[in-house]
Amino acid sequence: MKNTTKKKKTHTYPSKKTRWAYYMQAIEPTSEALNKAFPEYHPQWVQMSQMRAISPAMFIAFRELLGMNKEQCAAYLRIDVRTLHRWESGRCPISFAAFELLRVIQESVTFKMSHPVWDGWFISMDGVLVSPDLGGNQGLFTPGRLNYIASQGTEASHLRREVNRLEAELNETKEENTQLRQMFVAQGVVDELAAMQNTISELMNRIATARIIQFPAAPIDQPQEIAA
């Protein structure tokens, strides 16, 4: 007798550690095809591919986050603009490859550097940040050099604060010195005025105590008798 009992459909799940990684990133491993193709370990890029559901709204959001209009996006994806219109209007299924490409770019480090302030900067194949403004080794920035520059900047900041403090103290000392010099000058004038006052007082005392000499009055001529 033929067994007609239907086999219960079994789900294939990734490993326990991979499931933990999904859980910690708030991602649901819902793709049965991926779970079957990767029955145990899911690389990070596989996990991230299940983070966003393919939809016209999400595709438009990725395109706008990348700062591309429809013509630019179509040119980058090497498709016709009409195809892009059909994707974004929901009239045609969106290509997973195109959707995933925009997602990966939007979440990549190179996209984070795709800003006018980083014009000309790029990360080389050996992981070195390259500046267009400096030549030779001066324009190459490794993590170690960036850390060194940051530490030097912190030390320079401390030194600037110390210089500002010393300059403030020096200005206070200069101000105090100026005030003292003004006081010394003023004290000299006061001393000179005091000496003049003493001299005048002595002169006045000498005049007040001076002996007054009485001069005799001139004799009055006696009238002469007229001879007879």
Image: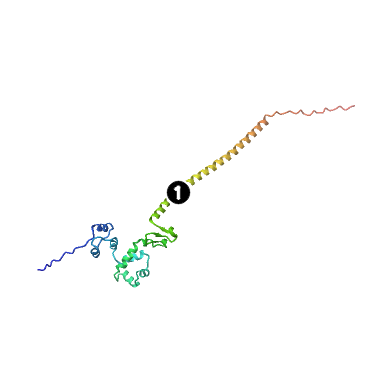
**Res 136 quadrant in image:** bottom left
Residue 57: tell me if it is visible: no
Q: Position of residue 107 (x, y in %)?
A: 34, 61
Quadrant occupied by the N terminus: bottom left
Taking depth in this image into account, of 6 and 63 the one nearest to the observer is: 6
Residue 57 position (above or below residue 150): below
Residue 148: tell me if it is visible: yes
Q: Is residue 59 left or right of residue 10?
A: right
Q: Residues within 10 Å of mark 1 (few under 14, many from 20)?
A: few
For numbered disc 1, what is the local secondary structure? helix
Question: Which residue is at 64% across, 34% downward?
Answer: 199
Q: Is residue 221 left or right of residue 1?
A: right
Q: Position of residue 225 (x, y in %)?
A: 86, 27
Residue 148 position (above or below residue 227): below
Residue for badge 1: 159
Question: Which residue is at 39% across, 59% downward?
Answer: 129
Question: Which residue is at 40% across, 53% downward?
Answer: 148
Outermost left residue: 1
**Res 42 quadrant in image:** bottom left
Total marks shown come to 1
Taking depth in this image into account, of 204 and 95 the one nearest to the observer is: 95
Q: Position of residue 181 (x, y in %)?
A: 56, 41
Q: Position of residue 59 (x, y in %)?
A: 32, 66
Q: Is residue 203 left or right of residue 19?
A: right
**Coloring scheme used:** rainbow
Q: Amino acid at mark 1?
A: Leu
Question: Which residue is at 43% across, 50% downward?
Answer: 155
